[in-house]
Amino acid sequence: MSLAAASILPFLLIIGVSIASKDCSQVECKGPLKYYNDLRCEPVYKNANDCCPTSYDCSHLRSHKNDKCYANGHEYSIGETLRDEDRSGACDIACICRNDYKNRASFLCAAVDCYRMRPAPGCYWRQNPDSCCGGEEVCPERPEDRYRCEVAGKIYQDGDEFQPDANTVCQCAKGYAGENVEPFCRAIKCGVELHRLNEVRDNCAPYFYSGQNPSTSCAFAYRCPNDNDTILVEQKKNDSNDAAQDTITQEEDSDVTCTFGNLKMRIGDELSESTEPGSNCVKCTCQVPPMPTCFRLDQATC
């Protein structure tokens, strides 16, 4: 892929208001919202008090250079080491910006394999949240002495992890009093720029397991464009049935589209199944531009 082609990314102009309701939970929203937020794209709302964005503005990615690395919104030159504040997790260790096999800058981090033996009977493992593999085996004299945390009606014990919301992970520990703050809690970061910068450059769409919620989950893989991709136009747009016609929304008739390679997808359009290994059995639909929302289908569906 040429430098010019690699830099072609989906961008949207901001249309409307980008302020959501303060009491909004986006768990029920469509689209890969966590992916957009991790890349610091700006949400675009149809109405000022809407909870769910109709699209995102990712135009800042246009300034990304092929000879630079990026993480947490910061730029690095080749040879520079990732700063601690830009790590997406404790296992981002010894990450260095270097030229990859495509002659583009990206981070290479140490491969970490944590080996942990099963705790002895009556004991449990307490993970150090600031360490990739570090922690300790704890063996209380009496099981009832193990510290407990009550969160939203559920009981967790010392060392247990829990998610009070889609963007936060916490660990029950002595001193936790119901406030989801450090040192007990930390934000869940996907580290898209850090770990998958070339997929962003190549306009690859993140995809998720069928049971994941893309509005709150980090993607586990990416579906990249290829020359055989085609658009499967949403059938209800060509359906003469009045009821089907009534379901066409204003957004589907707008100029806001998902961009995938050289293809422009309207809301509701699907991509043809990929012929590339690893990306087959992936269903991609334009829901919240500029990227299509993709799911890995289960074996029964494939």
Image: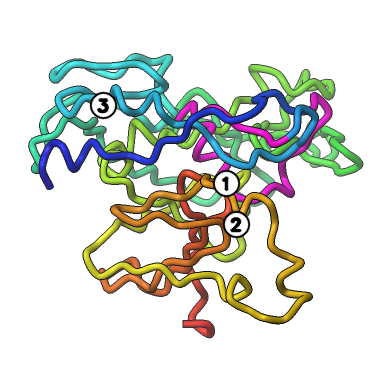
Instruction: Judge by depth and name the residue closer to the eye, 181 or 97.
Output: 97
- At 35% from the left and 16% from the top, the residue drawn is 74
Query: In the image, what residue type sits under mark 2?
Result: Gln
Indicate which disc, 3 or 2, sits on the residue closer to the N terminus. Answer: 3
Q: Position of residue 105 (x, y in %)?
A: 17, 30
Q: Nearer the viewer, mark 3 or mark 1?
A: 1
- Residue pointed to by mark 3: 95
Query: In whole angstroms, how far apart are the C-alphas of marks 1 and 2?
Result: 6 Å
- Residue pointed to by mark 2: 212
- At 36% from the left and 30% from the top, the residue drawn is 92
Q: Nearer the viewer, mark 3 or mark 2?
A: 2
- At 26% from the left and 39% from the top, the residue drawn is 8
**As drawn, 4 above or below 286:** above
- At 67% from the left and 81% from the top, the residue drawn is 240
Query: In whole angstroms, how far apart are the C-alphas of marks 3 and 2?
Result: 28 Å
Q: Residues within 10 Å of mark 3 (few under 14, many from 20)?
A: many
Query: In the image, what residue type sits under mark 1?
Result: Ser
Image quadrant where residue 109 sits = top left
Residue range (magenta): 21-46
Q: Position of residue 273 (x, y in %)?
A: 38, 73
- Residue pointed to by mark 1: 217
Indicate which disc, 1 or 2, sits on the residue closer to the N terminus. Answer: 2
Q: How is the image coloured?
A: rainbow
Instruction: Judge by depth and name the residue closer to the eye, 195 or 90.
Output: 195
Indicate which disc, 3 or 1, sits on the residue closer to the N terminus. Answer: 3
Q: Residues within 10 Å of mark 1 (few under 14, many from 20)?
A: many
Circles 3, 2 touching at the beta carbon (< 8 Å): no
